[in-house]
Image (cartoon, rainbow, N blue to C red):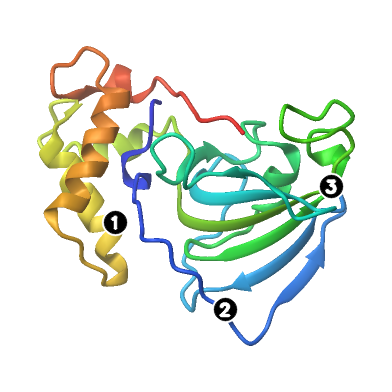
């Protein structure tokens, strides 16, 4: 699908620090440091879930930044399906089991990053460090159950009103309220990328055309 509407929730970026960190290492040697864990963790991420997150990438050797999702393109949190290769392997591993609202720091070895090839901003055989803030975790991108939940009038198309109601219900679960301009900006972006025929509605076909931002 082109998106999962409820995951286009763009929170203000807030950096929190707690008195403790938890560090562990997966069998694939991605080092995971939990910087912040929310009190309520209703759902933990797993392979196939649709994720909405901000992440910053740095070279471990000197701390130089090579990627920042907050300044890339429109600056919205990035969305992708976990565990299917839409991000580098180290992120797929390191973001498994995360809660919405959680923040992590990952140290990713070259074999789970850009390897011997590197890329235009990452030298070959580079160890990477990522700082991640996860905003949302939801069912995978081809869930028609999610579509039907949002399709309030059951006409098999999503209007801007239906999308807005879904966004507000999902976002305000945590008790945080936003003004209309906040939702207007997100909805404009959703329809710009997903309403392919420009009719002001998102059909089931458009919903199931999945495109993603690659890292």
3 left or right, relative to 90: left
Question: Which residue: 24% across, 29% down?
Answer: 191
Residue 192 placement: quadrant: top left
Whichever of labels 1 and 3 marks the residue nearer the N terminus, that label is 3
Question: Which residue: 73% across, 48% down?
Answer: 93
User: Which residue position holds label 1?
Assistant: 170
Q: Closer to the camera, 37 or 139?
A: 37
User: Which residue position holds label 3?
Assistant: 127
Please tell me whether mark 3 sits on a helix, a strand or a loop.
Answer: loop
**Disc 1 to disc 2, C-alpha distance:** 25 Å
Instruction: Count residues near mark 2 (Cα–Cα under 10 Å), then give few for <14, some for 14-19, many for 20+.
Output: few
**Disc 2 to disc 3, C-alpha distance:** 24 Å
> Which of the image's four quarters has the N terminus?
top left
**Disc 1 to disc 3, C-alpha distance:** 36 Å
Please tell me whether mark 1 sits on a helix, a strand or a loop.
Answer: helix
Q: Position of residue 196 (x, y in %)?
A: 27, 15
Question: Which residue: 25% across, 50% down?
Answer: 167
The numbered dot on residue 17 is 2
């Amino acid at each position: 699908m082109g998106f999962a509407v409820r995951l286009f929730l763009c929170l203000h970026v807030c950096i929190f620090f707690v008195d403790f960190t938890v560090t562990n290492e997966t069998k694939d040697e991605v080092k995971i440091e939990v910087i912040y864990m929310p009190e309520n963790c209703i759902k933990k991420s797993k392979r196939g879930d649709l994720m909405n997150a901000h992440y910053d990438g740095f070279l471990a050797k000197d701390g130089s930044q090579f990627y920042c999702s907050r300044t890339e393109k429109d600056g919205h949190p990035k969305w992708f399906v976990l565990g299917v290769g839409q991000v580098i392997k180290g992120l797929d591993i390191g973001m498994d089991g995360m809660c919405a609202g959680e923040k992590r720091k990952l140290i990713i070895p070259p074999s789970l990053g850009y390897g011997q090839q590197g890329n235009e901003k990452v030298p070959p055989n580079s160890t990477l460090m990522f700082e991640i803030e996860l905003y949302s975790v939801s069912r995978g991108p081809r869930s028609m159950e999610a579509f039907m939940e949002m399709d309030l009038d059951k006409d098999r198309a999503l209007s801007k009103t239906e999308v807005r109601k879904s966004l507000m219900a999902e976002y305000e679960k945590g008790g945080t309220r936003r003004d209309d301009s906040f939702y207007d900006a997100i909805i404009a972006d959703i329809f710009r990328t997903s309403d392919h025929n420009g009719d002001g509605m998102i059909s089931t076909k458009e919903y199931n055309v999945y495109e993603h931002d690659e890292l």
